[in-house]
Every structure is written in C-alpha cells, then in structure tokens.
Image (cartoon, helix red, strand yellow):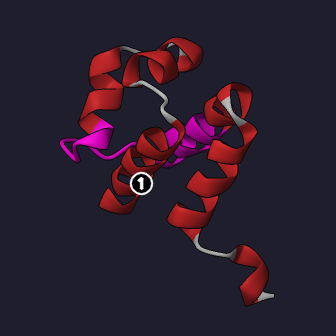
Amino acid sequence: MAKAGKALKRVLEIYGITQNRLAVVMEVNRSSVFGWVNEVADPPGDTVVKIRKALREIEPAAAEEFVKLFWGDVDEEQ
C-alpha cells in the first residue's frame, strides 16, 4: 500500500499542505503522517478514508487529487 504514501506526499507538495496541518486536522501525531509520506509505515484502510476526509476539510481539491492518485479514475471503471 505504499501507493497511499506516494499519493499523499504528492498532494501535500502540490497544495502546500504541511504534514503538521494534516496531523492536526486528523488528530494524529505528526510522526504518523511523516511515516506515511516517507513510506515508513502504511496507513490502514480506514485511515486512508480519514486522510481523504481531512484533506477535504483543508482543501477540497487536494482530497480529489488524493483519490485520483490513490484509487485512479474510478469513473473509468464503470
């Protein structure tokens, strides 16, 4: 699931969102976000959903980009 970390890192860079900001909104330790972004640890599936929710709160476009990078274009599969 390193794909989640890569997608998250890219989104944070594109939208100028700090790891600390995401951690605060998610109410998790910044070290957790650091671990995901640097592929030290994979976020569990339920946490991926929480990441998307937090990104939506910070910058809705960032949440959309995260979904696109992580899951691909889900509309294409329909």
Question: Eyeballing the image, is 17 above or below 65?
Answer: above
User: Which segment is the magenta one?
Assistant: 36-52
The amino acid pointed to by label 1 is Ala
Determine which residue is flagged by label 1: 4
Quadrant location of the C terminus? bottom right
Lateral position of residue 56 relative to residue 26, left or right: right
Question: Eyeballing the image, is 29 above or below 38?
Answer: above
Question: Eyeballing the image, is 1 above or below 18?
Answer: below
Residue under the point 37% across and 62% down: 3
Lateral position of residue 55 relative to residue 35, left or right: right
Residue under the point 45% across and 39% down: 12
Q: Hey, which quadrant is residue 73 in on the image?
A: bottom right
Question: Eyeballing the image, is 19 above or below 59?
Answer: above
Residue under the point 66% across and 45% down: 63
Quadrant location of the N terminus? bottom left
The residue closer to the viewer here, 69 or 17, is 17
Instruction: Point out residue 25 in the picture as x, y percentages from the top left corner.
Output: 58, 16
Instruction: Point out residue 74 in the picture as x, y percentages from the top left corner.
Output: 71, 75
